[in-house]
């Protein structure tokens, strides 16, 4: 069987993490089937890291572009694969082979106000709907996302398979003490701090996290605590700058931007508590990464986050700054609670496995390809 996988988004955050881990595990599990990876030019050597049954086909069309509607079917016409796996929601209409598509979430439909214009909403709704209808199987990453897909698109439930994400292996491995010391010194992370990791788009609810942090600091016992935000550049989000200025938090809130995974894994372990008050997630990897690192987690009680966190985190109403602040304060002032959440989180993170997820995906390839 020859499987084509669209890996052009290999270096993206969420979808890129998904693609990289699935490819890594398929390379370990499957030496029999042939895999052709449709990649950007800079990833020509990707197959060399995976195995003899992997090869690369370069396609220069940008994801979510008009050009990919022609170039991907043209590439497939030459490759003649048994099936195509699109790990995002675009399945060009001229694709004639069998297909598997991953729809991670329906955020564009749940929160259309965050899209740049109505044309973007029309594009997302049309492409996602076409992919849901035309694909032979739909993969998604949580039961919450499956419910959303069924709500928005007329597809039978049995067509959708829920296959959970997992964490990169290095988050579960304790780093050398010398590396921890260097990172702590480099970013001046010696004291207690609250950590948030992720982009700072509106649905991530970081502005309300700043409101909660301001409330938290009203407790004299917590006046030494700082907030560290790792992710996007704050300069693109005026509302966050205004919130920091409004509460005079310049000395207590730090935006570090993007960090490589090796450093991020250490920062997770240095944090006193990890907070993820997102309004919507298809899965939500950062809380799971924090759990694997042994860091107590506070996260939202909506969308997929209770499904991911289980009983290993404090779940709060993400629309309430008071609820977020109260949960953070509980963790910071109750050592027994923090230790319990840490132990539960480590155990919870172990229940998710890229190896099991890739094995199920490989099984679906066989089912679809042999149909």
Image (cartoon, grey):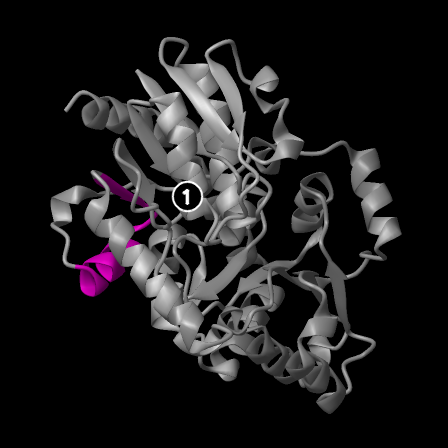
Residue beneath the point at 35% across and 34% down: 85
Camera-side residue of 95 and 4: 95
Relative side of 269 to 14, left or right: right
Residue beneath the point at 48% across and 36% down: 19
Q: Residues within 10 Å of mark 1 (few under 14, many from 20)?
A: some
Q: Which residues are magenta?
A: 137-153
User: Where 363 falls versus 307 (above or below)?
Assistant: above
Relative side of 244 to 62, left or right: right
User: Where 32 falls versus 272 (above or below)?
Assistant: above
For label 1, the residue is 70
Residue beneath the point at 36% across and 23% down: 3
Camera-side residue of 94 and 117: 94
Whole-percent x and y of residue 142?
32, 50
User: Where 288 falls versus 215 (above or below)?
Assistant: above
Relative side of 137 to 190, left or right: left
Camera sees residue 347: no
- Based on the picture, tell me whether residue 152 belongs to the magenta stretch: yes
Q: How many marks?
A: 1
Quadrant in which residue 292 is drawn: top right
- Say which element carries label 1: helix
Whole-percent x and y of residue 56?
53, 23
Residue beneath the point at 81% across and 79% down: 250
Camera-side residue of 274 and 284: 284
């Amino acid at each position: 069987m020859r499987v084509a996988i669209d890996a052009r988004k290999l270096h993206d955050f969420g979808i890129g993490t998904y693609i990289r881990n699935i490819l890594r595990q398929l390379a370990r599990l499957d030496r029999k089937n042939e895999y052709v990876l449709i990649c950007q030019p800079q990833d020509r050597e990707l197959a060399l890291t995976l195995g003899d049954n992997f090869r690369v086909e370069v396609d220069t069309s940008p994801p979510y572009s008009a050009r990919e509607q022609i170039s991907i079917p043209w590439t497939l016409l030459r490759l003649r694969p048994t099936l195509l796996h699109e790990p995002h929601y675009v399945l060009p209409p001229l694709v004639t082979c069998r297909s598997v598509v991953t729809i991670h979430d329906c955020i564009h439909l749940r929160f259309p106000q965050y899209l740049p214009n109505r044309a973007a909403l029309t594009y997302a709704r049309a492409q996602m709907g076409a992919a849901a209808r035309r694909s032979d199987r739909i993969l998604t990453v949580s039961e919450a996302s499956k419910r959303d897909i069924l709500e928005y698109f007329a597809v039978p439930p049995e067509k959708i398979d829920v296959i959970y994400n997992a964490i990169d292996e290095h988050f579960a491995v304790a780093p050398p003490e010398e590396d921890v010391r260097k990172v702590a010194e480099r970013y001046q992370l010696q004291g207690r701090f609250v950590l948030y990791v992720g982009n700072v788009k509106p649905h991530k609810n970081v502005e309300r996290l700043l409101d909660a942090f301001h409330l938290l600091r009203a407790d004299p016992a917590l006046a030494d605590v700082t907030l560290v935000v790792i992710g996007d550049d704050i300069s693109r989000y005026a509302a966050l700058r205004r919130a920091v200025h409004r509460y005079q938090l310049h000395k207590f809130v730090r935006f570090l931007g993007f960090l490589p995974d090796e450093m991020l894994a250490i920062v997770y372990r240095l944090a006193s508590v990890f907070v993820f008050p997102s309004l919507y997630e298809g899965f939500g990897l950062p809380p799971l990464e924090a759990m694997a690192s042994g860091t107590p987690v506070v996260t939202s009680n909506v969308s997929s986050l209770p499904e991911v966190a289980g009983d290993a985190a404090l779940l709060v109403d993400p629309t309430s700054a008071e609820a977020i602040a109260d949960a953070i304060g509980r963790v910071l002032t109750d050592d027994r609670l923090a230790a319990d959440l840490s132990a539960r989180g480590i155990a919870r993170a172990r229940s998710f496995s890229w190896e099991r997820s890739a094995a199920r995906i490989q099984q679906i390839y066989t089912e679809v390809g042999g149909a």
